[in-house]
Image (spheres, helix red, strand yellow):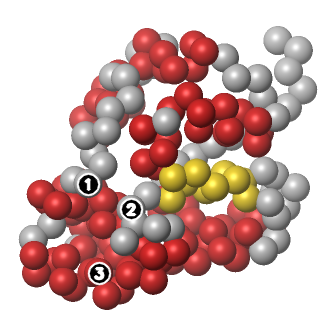
Amino acid sequence: RGIDKTYWGDSTQTNTAWHREIYSVFPGAKYLFMVRDGRDVVSAYKKGGQARFGLLADPVRAAIHWNRSIEAWHWLSRKVNVGLISYENLITNTTDQLKYVCDFLNIKYEQEMLNFFSAVPDLELYRQAHHVNLHKPVSDSSIGQWKSILTAEEISRIEPLIRNNLRRFQYE
């Protein structure tokens, strides 16, 4: 429809392991990095379980993986301008953050973007359990979920590993 740009996005955190390769193929691309409280990331992997996330379902491995994703952002931000948003801000200030994303990507913000859940394609992929929230408005129910999902022992094992990056992004 007359659009001369191609947009591709992916929110799969595991792809941060390939940041150097992605950058080598797309050095002129715009990169947007979303950071989320590492404890919530760890709890999401744990909650998803080993069948879905394999070894990342282990909280210590998930914490190490989160740190590596932060290292990927840091490496990439030294190469190009990387837009940075926090998951929590996107959830609690959706309109402002979406406007920031649109501005960063040089695309027009449209109010109907907030109604994404009413335009999810009717495909089997989007009916899978882990995509259930695509069909709902934005919710803050996953913010702070680590407090009820992680045990005290798991928290004491992961926090020393991720403390510096929690501080870096003001999660402590």
Lower sequence index among marks 3 and 2: 2
Q: Residue at x 50, y 32 (%)?
A: 94
103 with respect to 131 (left or right): right
Position of 101 relative to 95 (above/below)? below
Q: Which residue is mark 3?
A: 159
Dot 2 amino acid type: Asp
Q: Which residue is mark 2?
A: 37
Percent position of residue 57, x then y? 24, 67
Q: CA distance from mark 1 to mark 3?
A: 14 Å
Position of 1 relative to 28 (above/below)? above
Percent position of residue 160, x then y? 31, 87
Percent position of residue 65, x then y? 42, 74
Question: Mark 1–mark 2 contact, CB under 8 Å?
Answer: yes
Residue 81 shows up from this direction? yes
Q: Between residues 88 and 13, which one lies in front from this camera angle?
A: 88
Classify 10 Å Cα crowding around label 3: few (below 14), some (14-19), many (20 and above).
some
Dot 1 amino acid type: Gly
Classify 10 Å Cα crowding around label 2: few (below 14), some (14-19), many (20 and above).
many
